[in-house]
Image: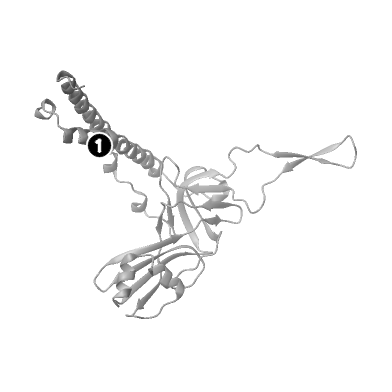
């Protein structure tokens, strides 16, 4: 145990990092364990049943704000523009918006910035050297330093668009909750009936523009999948290797604490602390 007998400044620094890093590593392992349990026996549930918790639901896409795909020009809830240069460099530009997943009976608000979107190719285009493109497409390409550089030196580009079209069928796996989880079963409002001593009791109703559910990644699970086709088993499989943090995180933090405690004892013995 030479490391413990001769503590160093560098060792103390690494020990401090170990103490700080063990907790999030453990948290990721615990999150993985919970997520695997939720996804193991997950089956598709009709949206009309208003399921809550981790769910797999399906419906049609309805837009909450206008957005158009850069190549096909179709209205969509989000898209990915994949750009490939002649040198084999590939990068992607994403733009996504909250949208509604609707059926004839119910609707859900869907969005999470960290969600994974699995979408089929909707359009492709070859952009020749120095070829003029639309202002919308030029603005998108300018977001990427690689694309700006390739356009600047006149490299041809190959563009692939993947988008979630308005009105398309969509599968969503995420954490669902009722849009008004804390409201009373019926909001009560008193209205005058025209007499001084009688009132009618009216039940407040949800307005038609409000969704029945909100679906996102879930604060403690951080998982959401949006797909234009039924997700495969592989898409819902979370690797067990990530659960190593359940044991590794506490051990790393404990090792760092032991090292720091030993260093403090050494300083105290030398009269420096």
Where does the N terminus fall, quadrant-wise? top left
Residue located at (33% from left, 46% from top): 238
Colouring: one colour
Q: Dot 1 corresponds to which residue?
A: 17
Q: Is residue 228 visible?
A: no
* Residue 212 to residue 166: above or below: above
Q: Quadrant of the C terminus?
A: top left
x and y percentages locating residue 124 in the rendered image:
38, 74
**Where does the image place residue 2, in percent across and percent down from the top left?**
9, 28
**Image side of residue 235 versus residue 77, left or right:** left
Q: Is residue 126 above or below residue 141?
A: below
Image quadrant in which you'd find residue 152? bottom left
Q: Quick one: 35 or 218, which is closer to the camera?
A: 218
Q: Residue furthest front?
A: 272
Q: Secondary structure at mark 1?
A: helix
Q: Give the residue drawn at x 14%, y 20%.
A: 270
Asked which quadrant contains residue 24, the reply is top left
Tell me if I can see residue 134 in this picture: yes
In percent of width and height, residue 121 lies at 39, 68
Q: Position of residue 37 (x, y in %)?
A: 38, 39
* Left or right: 134 in relation to 6: right
């Amino acid at each position: 145990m030479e490391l413990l007998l001769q503590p160093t400044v560098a060792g103390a620094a690494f020990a401090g990092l170990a103490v700080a890093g063990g907790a999030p590593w453990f948290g990721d392992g615990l999150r993985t364990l919970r997520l695997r349990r939720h996804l193991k026996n997950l089956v598709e549930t009709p949206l009309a049943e208003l399921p809550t918790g981790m769910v797999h639901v399906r419906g049609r896409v309805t837009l909450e704000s206008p957005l158009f795909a850069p190549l096909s020009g179709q209205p969509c809830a989000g898209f990915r523009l994949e750009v490939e240069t002649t040198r084999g460099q590939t990068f992607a530009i994403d733009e996504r918006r909250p949208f509604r997943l609707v059926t004839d009976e119910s609707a859900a608000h869907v969005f999470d910035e960290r969600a994974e979107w699995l979408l089929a190719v909707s359009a492709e285009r070859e952009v020749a050297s120095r070829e003029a493109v639309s202002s919308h497409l030029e603005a998108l390409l300018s977001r990427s330093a690689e694309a700006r550089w390739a356009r600047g030196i006149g490299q041809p580009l190959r563009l692939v668009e993947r988008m979630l079209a308005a009105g398309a069928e969509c599968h969503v796996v995420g954490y669902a909750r009722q849009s008004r989880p804390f409201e009373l079963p019926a909001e009560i409002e008193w209205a005058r009936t025209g007499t001084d001593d009688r009132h009618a009791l009216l039940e407040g109703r949800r307005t038609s523009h409000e969704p029945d559910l909100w679906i996102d990644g879930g604060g403690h699970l951080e998982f959401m999948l949006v797909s234009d086709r039924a997700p495969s088993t592989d898409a819902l499989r979370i690797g067990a290797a990530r659960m190593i943090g359940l044991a590794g995180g506490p051990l790393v933090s404990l090792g760092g604490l032991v090292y720091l405690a030993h260093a403090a004892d050494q300083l105290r013995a030398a009269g420096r602390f």
